[in-house]
Amino acid sequence: MKMQGFTFADAAMERSPDQEDEIDIGDVVNDGDGAPISIGYGRWGPGSTLTETMLVDDVMVVVEGGLEVTSDGTAVSAGPGAIVHMPKGAEVTIRAGAEGAKTAYVTYPNWRTARG
């Protein structure tokens, strides 16, 4: 692999697996590139919610809009520029604000590989 730069436009967005709400994701780097991590972007529709147990360590950066992330009774409100770390094994609920959100993420290991 070589050094690369990406923008939101580089991500081929698709519905996040097993989600009914408007949550789309697009990897720009993953195991298909020989990387042990996933790097990508997320697009969250207004009020969309995801609840899951993290299968990977996930670092999410809010690019636009806002999210509330809750785990173990602790809530973090995240706006543009905020970084949220969700460790492997944590039960989290992520809820987009009224305007929705755009995010960037890095996971270790690759989230698709971890899902099996």
Image: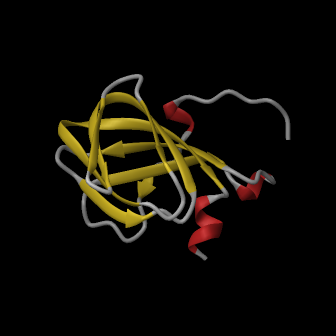
Q: Residue at x 41, y 22 (%)?
A: 81
Extreme-top residue of the structure: 81
Q: Is residue 45 left or right of residue 19?
A: left
Out of 88 and 3, give the one closest to the viewer. Answer: 88
Q: Position of residue 76 (x, y in %)?
A: 30, 38
Q: Residue at x 31, y 27 (%)?
A: 79
In this figure, which colouring scheme has been used for the structure?
A: secondary structure
Answer above or below: position of 77 versus 43: above
Out of 65 and 75, give the one closest to the viewer. Answer: 75
Q: Residue at x 44, y 60 (%)?
A: 90
Query: Image quadrant for the N terminus?
Result: top right
Q: Position of residue 48 (x, y in %)?
A: 22, 52
Q: Quadrant of residue 32?
A: bottom right
Answer above or below: position of 99 versus 106: above
Q: Position of residue 26 (x, y in %)?
A: 51, 48
Q: Residue at x 59, y 65 (%)?
A: 112
Extreme-front residue of the structure: 73
Query: Image quadrant for the C terminus?
Result: bottom right
Extreme-left residue of the structure: 98
**How many badges with numbers are in the image?**
0
Q: Is residue 43 left or right of residue 90?
A: left
Q: Quadrant of residue 17?
A: bottom left
Out of 51 and 38, give the one closest to the viewer. Answer: 51
Extreme-right residue of the structure: 1
Q: Position of residue 82 (x, y in %)?
A: 40, 27
